[in-house]
Amino acid sequence: MASLIDRTVKDQGKAEQVKSVVSEIFAELKAIRDQKCAGHRRLYELNAKYEATPEEFTKVLDDAYNQRVQSPTKILVLRSR
């Protein structure tokens, strides 16, 4: 990605800014993936636990939903810099 940015953006200062933003976006995408995997893992654990309450499932699903809503917003804010 860095070489593509260097070839496309002629101003070196701007190119460094773009690389920084791209790096932050990739870090956010990785965090999203990790959070999603952790949420799935929690659901599998709850599903295996017979005494799990509906509230426990709801909490995990609510957390996953909130993260899914917040993450694109973070990426848009990074992109608009």
Image (cartoon, rainbow, N blue to C red):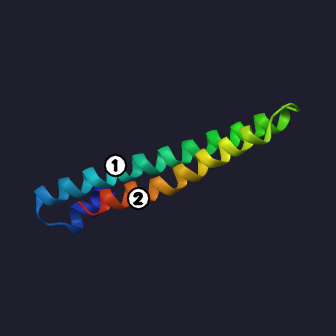
Which residue: 22% across, 65% down? Answer: 7
Q: Is residue 60 left or right of residue 12?
A: right
Residue 78 at x, y percent in the picture: 31, 56
Q: Is residue 14 left or right of residue 27?
A: left
The residue identified by callout 1 is 24
Q: Dot 1, crowdedness within 10 Å: few (<14), some or many (≥20)?
A: some
Callout 1 touching callout 2 (CB < 8 Å):
no
Label number found at residue 41: none
Which residue: 26% across, 50% down? Answer: 20
The local secondary structure at tag 2 comes to helix
The residue identified by callout 2 is 73
Quadrant location, the C terminus: bottom left
Sequence-wise first label, 1 or 2? 1
Up/down of 26 relative to 44, above or below = below
Residue 5: name its quadrant. Answer: bottom left
Residue 51: name its quadrant. Answer: top right
Residue closest to the far right = 50
Residue 76 at x, y percent in the picture: 36, 62
Q: Dot 2, crowdedness within 10 Å: few (<14), some or many (≥20)?
A: few
Camera-side mark, 1 or 2: 2
* Distance from the alpha carbon under mark 1 to that under mark 2: 13 Å
